[in-house]
Image (cartoon, coloured by chain):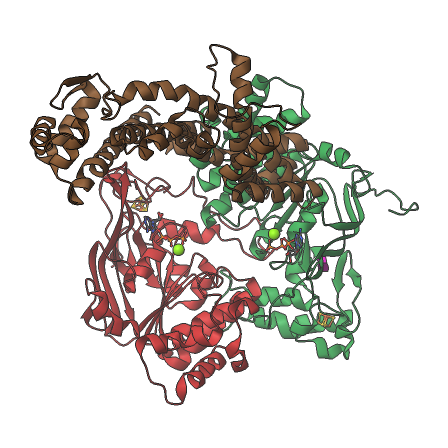
Chain colours: A green, B brown, C red
Amino acid sequence: MSAETTPSDAFLELRDLRIHFPTDDGLVKSVDGLSFRLERGKTLGIVGESGSGKSVTSLGILGLHNRKNARVSGEIWLDGAELVSSTQEYVRGLRGKRMAMIFQDPLSAMHPYYTVGNQIIEAYRVHHRVSKAVARKHAIEMLGRVGIPNPAQRVDDYPHQFSGGMRQRAMIAMALCCDPELLIADEPTTALDVTVQAQILDLMRDLQRDFNAALIIITHDLGVVAELSDDILVMYGGKCVEYGTAENIFETPEHPYTWGLLGSMPRLDRESTERLLPIKGSPPSLINIPPGCAFHPRCSYADRTGGKGSAEVPELSEVRGGHKVRCHLPANERHAIWESEIKPVLEAQ
Amino acid sequence: MVTYLIRRLIGAVIMLLIVSMATFAIFFLVPQIAGATPEGMASRYVGRTASAEDAKIAADRLGFNDPLVVQYGRFIKGIVAGAEFDYGPGVEQCPPPCLGYSFITRQPVWPDLLDRLPVTLSLAVGAAVLWLIIGLSTGVISALRRGSVFDRAAMTLALAGVSLPIFFTGLISLLVFSYGNPFAVFAQGGHYTPITENPGEWAYNLILPWITLAFLFAAQYARLTRAGMLETMGEDYIRTARAKGLIERTVVVKHGMRGALTPIVTIFGLDFGLLVGGAVLTESTYSLPGLGKYAIDAITNNDLPKVMGVTLLSAFFVVFANLIVDLLYAVVDPRVRLS
Amino acid sequence: MNSPESAGEAAVKAPTREPLLAVTGLAKHFPVTKGLLKRQVGAVKAVDGVSFEVFKGETLGLVGESGCGKTTTGRLITRLVEPTGGSVVFEGHDITHMSQSRIRPLRRDMQMIFQDPYSSLNPRHTVGAIVGAPFRIQGIKTEHGIKKAVQELLALVGLNPEHYNRYPHEFSGGQRQRIGIARTLALKPKLIVADEPVSALDVSIQAQVVNLLEDLQNELDLTYVVIAHDLSVVRHISDRVAVMYLGKIMELADRRDLYETPRHPYTTALLSAVPIPDTRGRGSRTRVRLQGDVPSPLNPPAACRFSTRCWKADEICRTVEPPLVELAPRHQVACHFPENTPAVQPG
Ligand SMILES: Nc1ncnc2c1ncn2[C@@H]1O[C@H](COP(=O)(O)OP(=O)(O)OP(=O)(O)O)[C@@H](O)[C@H]1O
Ligand SMILES: Nc1ncnc2c1ncn2[C@@H]1O[C@H](COP(=O)(O)OP(=O)(O)OP(=O)(O)O)[C@@H](O)[C@H]1O
Ligand code: SF4
Ligand code: SF4
Ligand SMILES: [Mg+2]
Ligand SMILES: [Mg+2]
């Protein structure tokens, strides 16, 4: 971190975060210059396809990325403190207490040999000097709060005795037991059935209101982010390609990749189309990110910028009111394309 | 848990029955199939000099002409209630558990085995303690510092350990530490002092065999532990443990090692069970009067009842160790206990 | 919006009356054994009395939550597992208990596409060998040699025919799924059972594969049974949809009917649980939230299997199993108190 950086006044702010992994095959640029701000009580949704760097971002914020081979640069400000340049011990002290995480697969994310209660008690006692009995009472209370029936009995069960949905509830209880101010949920419902997913999303929405935490929800499912997010960040090839409020992203999306995602999804709320509008090709390998705009080999509008797409990395520039897009197309042209070419097709269905 | 225990116990008893049948088959049935006549078998008991007539009578008396089921029944009855061997010239008592009766020394096998057991047990327990301490700690450290100098050195040594045969490492260590050279600080082979007599001497005499035996197993365990730790430390639940803010030591010990070492319990139980049945190579290299050496001697002398006795006892230890392992596993892994 | 689509659809895909596949009372119980002696202590009723027909040229979608028996149904239809009860009639042949040797010729006409494009292709075989395998196994002569035939198939599924000599690991997930599809198409099957064909793929790739499946259906006059847990995908691709729960069909209807006027409470709940990728109307959607998880198929609830989670459940639901009956033309429902259905039939 250079000396002249100014502390952030946001609750959470990432500035140009880069997490690169040197490997035998080349440098993997998992996260490549990511910046955003998030306030308490707000929810940020991060969407993107597999391998776009979503999980590495979230692990990086908590300092849980593979430290042996990662090269990290940039700044992560949490409530006035910069984390990238802090000691590991300092960041460890924040983990679980001020920032917590929920993972995708609750079965493998819990230790099979300890009871659910023990694992919550452990999480609580790392940061609170209390007796086991007090921590246990707290664990039971937390389990009840996330909607587990008979918490006083279930607290002594092992993870495999819980159903999938209950396990994810228990994970949430574990993450929330120290009342964190930042909660990151990495694909929290991907392993669950839709009816259970709906329960968990409801639960997270309610809890966030109660705890007034900042929530980052990471997923590849646009439906899930639409349910919860205030702001949405679309990631592609380790970079943010579009950022805006949920309304920006769903009502006036401006990046061709976002259009592609919206066109790829069959939707229940609309007439079913004759055909979906897929994005051609497949997501890039992060070792060989295409030069220029990473999306250009798959973009239908690449030729409209006169070859600039393959030569020059577009800047993430603000369209209006915080809505940012990383694309060489002029803003008015993008807007025109959306209004005249994309929106009618998506909505006429 | 109780039904699990009972199920396992019944399983163990069935296993022992099968083992006894197999042993019986090997020692009584196979020779007969291979062409040995009842007389031929009986003549071993009465001595080769006896006449064919005597042998035939002995065969009758020893029951070699009875149907197989009857013979097997008598064999089991001997184990449970004792037996008498009426081989003609005299009748020998063989009190329970009668695992057979040596026709060379004219002695029941069981007391012999009881004599030898403490030696083997001392050898096995001492070596096990050593190899567990060395093997597990090396494995854990290697895994945590994968690719470091320590890791590479330890794994090279471990590879040597698992590939070098015991009699080789045994002889080398005997040469280096014994037989009148400057490093000769340890006893030569062949001595054994019961721990009840003199614990110091007991240990002193056993140090070299312990090290030799432990080296082999420590090498195996170091490799297993390293592999197990590497796998566990990559598990999602380790990431969860770190995300709680636990200090790294707790993450490694409470979450990593607990997961990695549990499967090793199984392997340890079986290895130990096998070993108590006779550490054949080590015992013969160091001339220790344990069960393994007893078996080797019996085989050399063609003293079938002794061989059979050792076999049965070893099998019993293996089955027993298996039972203990299963129970232990249920204690450490709740998924086994509760399913 | 009164779209012309429904009329067009009916015209294009008007099913001929003779079903290609007829399944009646199909059941598969996996025994659960215990102890050394493998004593049977129960059974997982993975599929428990399922009946439906699939007509030539149409797509039947099977949806339901994890463990409801979709995959098992698919494997029963293609006789990859032996049914415990019921019957499967394919093109007039009763194949329920046919021996594997007699079934082999029919295998040409029934193919299966699997979920995982990573594990379903042998990594040591070239694409040419994988896609050409069915010709060799069935001993089929092709006009211009197998290689030519394989290359035509690759082109058909949108892969470069030059990729003949490459290995699966050189392809992305979507491309691998295409290879899998090319392999199933090799023998020009009549029926394709696709088990979660897109659920392992990225959103943008899912759409490519869905479109490909639709194009192939039109071009080759294929009949599909598509198994998926994603209700939007199933709605997009199917003509008729069966909703399964714990080994039983809860509702079976034409796509439009099912999604617009679901009659089974479970279908209603499923549909309302799907998150909609839009911000308009956020919070104004009426939601039905189910309590708890799906019960274990080892010990399913008595009578109506949905009764433990159903908000309409009554005494009768726990004592009398509701039969699957046709409540409206081509709309079968298994419920005592169906939704969107007047209690007393009008007229
Ligand atoms: N320790 C590491 N060493 C090398 N590469 C890594 C490491 N960790 C992650 N990567 C790479 O970083 C890229 C981004 O991974 P990440 O897990 O963040 O993707 P994701 O967006 O979460 O995808 P998914 O939706 O599949 O979870 C991947 O290509 C991955 O292979
Ligand atoms: N070979 C088997 N032996 C025992 N039980 C089985 C076997 N195959 C499946 N089952 C059980 O049968 C039930 C139905 O399984 P099936 O795979 O058909 O479900 P599914 O609907 O395809 O679920 P998913 O969406 O998870 O793929 C499950 O409870 C499963 O555990
Ligand atoms: S910069 Fe060019 S290639 Fe990239 S998204 Fe915009 S139009 Fe497409
Ligand atoms: S039969 Fe009863 S319990 Fe079952 S779905 Fe209908 S109303 Fe609900
Ligand atoms: Mg991820
Ligand atoms: Mg399945």
The total of numbered circles placed on residues is 0
Along the line of sight, which residue is nearer the eye, C177 or C271? C177
Along the line of sight, which residue is nearer the eye, C285 or C342? C285
The N terminus of chain B lies in which quarter of the figure? top left
Q: Quadrant of ligand 1?
A: bottom right
Residue A206 lies left or right of residue C237; in this view the side is: right
Q: Give residue B131's quadrant in the image.
A: top right
Res C140 visible: yes
- Vertical arrangement, residue A63 with respect to residue A260, above or below: above
Measuring from the top left, give residue C133's x and y in whole percent: 39, 74
Farthest-out residue, top: B197
Residue appearing at x 67%, y 36% in the figure: A212
Res B136 visible: no
Farthest-out residue, right: A4
Measuring from the top left, give residue C303's x and y in whole percent: 25, 43
- Vertical arrangement, residue B251 with respect to residue C47, above or below: above
Measuring from the top left, give residue B267's x and y in whole percent: 45, 35
Along the line of sight, which residue is nearer the eye, B158 or C10? B158
The C terminus of chain B lies in which quarter of the figure? top left
Residue C262 lies left or right of residue B31; in this view the side is: right
Residue appearing at x 51%, y 23% in the figure: B126
**The residue stretch that appears in magenta:** A239-243
- Vertical arrangement, residue B228 with respect to residue A137, above or below: below
Residue B64 lies left or right of residue A236; in this view the side is: left
Along the line of sight, which residue is nearer the eye, A337 or C68? C68
Main SS of the magenta part reads strand
Residue appearing at x 26%, y 34% in the figure: B19
Residue B116 lies left or right of residue A51; in this view the side is: left
Q: Is residue C330 magenta?
A: no
Measuring from the top left, give residue B229's x and y in whole percent: 57, 39
Residue appearing at x 48%, y 74% in the figure: C127
